Amino acid sequence: IGHIAPEAAHGGPIALIHEGDPIRIDIAARRIDVLVDDDVLAARRADWKAPEPRYPTGALAKYAKLVGSAERGAVCE
């Protein structure tokens, strides 16, 4: 698995996975499923908050603001 999108930092489904959650990887079907009840994931979604930027100023802050996710090609938008 080289990359998973949308990214957790943008609130993608991977943001809801916690340490120790069981997952199923089906390479033939190109799927990764978290084996956690939907109500648990819904509660996690309700509690989720976007992480604070690691770099609030400087070149990396500008990069983070201008470049889209890898799912969209990681190019300036």
Image: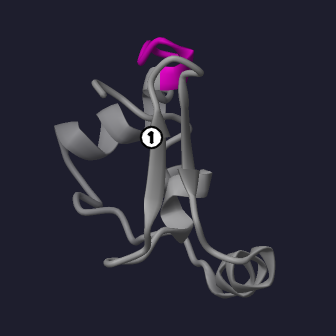
Left or right position of 45 against 9: right
User: Foreground residue, 56 or 3?
Assistant: 3
Q: x and y percent of residue 4 in the render?
A: 43, 35
Q: Which residue is mark 1?
A: 25
* Rendering coords of residue 24 (x, y %): 48, 50
Q: Residue at x 69, y 76 (%)?
A: 41
Amino acid type at circle 1 is Ile
- The residue depicted at 48 percent of the width and 68 percent of the height is 17
Above or below 59: residue 42? below
Label count reads 1
Residue 67, horizontal then vertical, whole percent: 43, 25
Q: Main secondary structure of the magenta part?
A: loop
**Position of residue 37 in the picture relative to residue 69 (left or right):** right
Q: Vertically, is 74 above or below 68? A: above
Seen from the viewer's position, the closer of residues 76 and 51 is 51
Residue 38: which quarter of the image?
A: bottom right
Q: The C terminus appears in which quarter of the rendering?
A: top right
49 relative to 67, above or below:
below
Q: Which residues are magenta?
A: 71-77
Q: Position of residue 44 (x, y in %)?
A: 64, 82
Q: Does residue 61 show up magenta in the picture?
A: no
